[in-house]
Image (cartoon, helix red, strand yellow):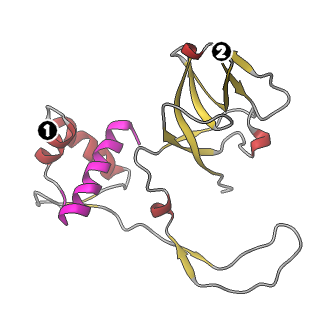
Amino acid sequence: MTQPERQIMDFIEKHIQTQGYSPSVTEIMLGIGYKSRGSVHRYIDSLVRKGLLLRESGRNRGLTLPEKPKIPLLGRIAAGMPIEAIPESECVDFYEKLNCPGLYQLIVSGDSMIDAGICDGDSVLIQPAQSAPNGAIVVALIDGENATLKRIYQRDGRVTLKAENPAYEPQYYRPEQVQVQGVLFCLARFYR
């Protein structure tokens, strides 16, 4: 999902939650500061094609959100010594857990964070931020051009970006060279 699409989705979701019905295209346009209804229409069309929005034709306020599936939680599983299998019957609403303003996804390329359990091809969800505590895993923009996922440490007037793989040396920068763009929120790995 592109940033403008995320902005429109956030506006629509908030409007539906607070008003009980979807906003009109004009309300979306004014609400997010666009000057063209056509641009809003194009982003809405893209969101509908991606299945992130539903549209009832012939209605001015015909945008709806698809029902978000819940995954059943059936119990706990041991990763060490086996434990008794006791069935549970709850549902986990991942969408609710992931409801964090501005959250975005990146696909990891490379193995520099493998000892943190982050592998090539994993999806990481990033919470936008402009700063982070020492030791946090961040998306760092270096010299305004290159982005990387690393642990950040800020000491003695320099920024260290540290990989979680001994094959990679720490990278040292002046503070003005590094801009934090987000902090790791969670990791997703799909095996199918």
Where is residue 59? Give x, y as percent.
11, 60
Residue 190 sits above or below residue 141 on the image: below
**Which one is in front in this view, the residue at disc 1 or the one at disc 2?**
2
Quadrant position of residue 171: top right
Report, in whole angstroms, how far the alpha carbon at label 1 lies from the one at label 2.
Answer: 44 Å
The disc at residue 37 is: 1
Q: Which residue is mark 2?
A: 173
- Which residue of the protein is positioned furthest toward the front in this rendering? 156
- Give the amino acid type for the residue marked by disc 1 in the picture: Arg
Amino acid at pointer 2: Tyr
Whether 102 is drawn above or below 13: the answer is above
Q: Image check: 123 left or right of 6? A: right
In x, y percent, where is residue 169? 80, 22
Q: Is residue 7 magenta?
A: yes
- Give above or below for 172 relative to 35: above
Question: Splitting the image into 4 quarters, where does residue 139 fall?
Answer: top right
* Magenta highlight on residue 31: no
Residues rendered magenta in the picture: 1-22
Q: Which sits in the foreground, 86 or 24?
A: 86
Q: Position of residue 143 (x, y in %)?
A: 55, 13
Around disc 2, counting alpha carbons within 10 Å, would you say few (fewer than 14), some (14 to 19), or many (20 or more)? Answer: some
**Label 1, residues with CA under 10 Å away: few <14, some 14-19, many ≥20:** some
